[in-house]
Image (cartoon, rainbow, N blue to C red):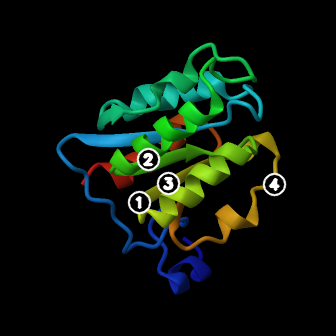
């Protein structure tokens, strides 16, 4: 761990303050967010993350790893919005994969913050993309950067296993 990380009070991963811990309810309701209309490049990664998250509870949004096209679901946009807001309200925690920019995911993160939800964002540094400062600079978001899913799961488990 770097001197700067120690100075900032960051945990062993050097990414998240050591004092940040998320209590894990016996059966968590997890809202997973990932790009749909913004592009489906991450679909296979989303499926693996969702499968991993199921060890900790029910993933309310597991449908996003299905074979949805970039157009999204066949439901009316109003119905999708109402359903997803309902799920956000029910969720104990929000986990978002933010490697591929998406207006919808950004909106979901903002709503979750407004609802005072615990938020974890996953960002793959191997994709050579620049993460939005609105995510990276937000003190209310636990940001997990990773190079492979094994690393992501290990870091994610630090916060979900309490």
Residue 51, image quadrant: top left
Tell me the quadrant of the picture where the C terminus can be found: bottom left
Is 79 left, or right, of 37 in this rendering?
A: left
**Cα distance between the residues tagged 4 and 2:** 26 Å
The numbered dot on residue 120 is 3
User: Relative to residue 116, is residue 107 depicted above or below?
Assistant: above
Label 2: element kind: helix
Extreme residue in the left direction: 26
Kindly identify which residue carries mark 1. 117
Q: Is residue 144 visible?
A: no
Asked if the residues shown at circle 2 and circle 1 are in contact, with their CB atoms under 8 angstroms apart, the answer is: yes
Observer-side mark, 2 or 3, equals 2
Label 4: element kind: loop
Asked if the residues shown at circle 3 and circle 1 are in contact, with their CB atoms under 8 angstroms apart, the answer is: no
Asked if the residues shown at circle 4 and circle 2 are in contact, with their CB atoms under 8 angstroms apart, the answer is: no
**Cα distance between the residues tagged 2 and 1:** 9 Å
Task: Give percent across and percent down for residue 74.
Answer: 63, 17
| Residue in view at x 75 percent, y 56 percent | 131
Tell me the quadrant of the picture where the N terminus can be found: bottom right
Kindly identify which residue carries mark 2. 88
Q: Nearer the viewer, residue 73 or 158?
A: 73
| Residue in view at x 67 percent, y 44 percent | 104
Kindly identify which residue carries mark 4. 130
Task: Give percent across and percent down for residue 35.
Answer: 68, 36
The numbered dot on residue 61 is none
Observer-side mark, 4 or 2, equals 2
Q: Nearer the viewer, residue 148 or 138?
A: 138
User: Relative to residue 54, is residue 29 depicted above or below?
Assistant: below
Residue 11, image quadrant: bottom left
Q: Is residue 114 visible?
A: yes
Tell me which label, 2 or 3, sits earlier in the chain: 2
Is 18 left, or right, of 66 in this rendering?
A: left
């Amino acid at each position: 761990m770097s001197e700067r990380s120690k100075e900032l009070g960051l945990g062993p991963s050097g990414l998240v303050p050591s004092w940040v811990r998320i209590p894990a309810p016996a059966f968590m309701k997890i809202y997973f967010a990932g790009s749909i209309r913004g592009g489906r490049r991450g679909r296979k990664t989303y499926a693996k993350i969702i499968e991993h998250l199921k060890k900790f509870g029910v993933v309310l949004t597991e449908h996003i790893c299905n074979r949805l096209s970039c157009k999204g679901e066949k439901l009316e946009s109003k119905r999708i919005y109402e359903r997803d807001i309902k799920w956000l309200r029910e969720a104990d925690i929000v986990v978002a994969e933010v490697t591929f920019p998406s207006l919808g995911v950004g909106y979901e993160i903002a709503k979750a913050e407004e609802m005072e939800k615990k938020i974890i964002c996953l960002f793959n540094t191997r994709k050579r993309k620049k993460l939005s400062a609105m995510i990276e600079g937000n003190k209310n978001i636990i940001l997990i950067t990773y190079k492979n899913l094994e690393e992501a799961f290990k870091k994610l488990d630090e916060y979900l296993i309490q």
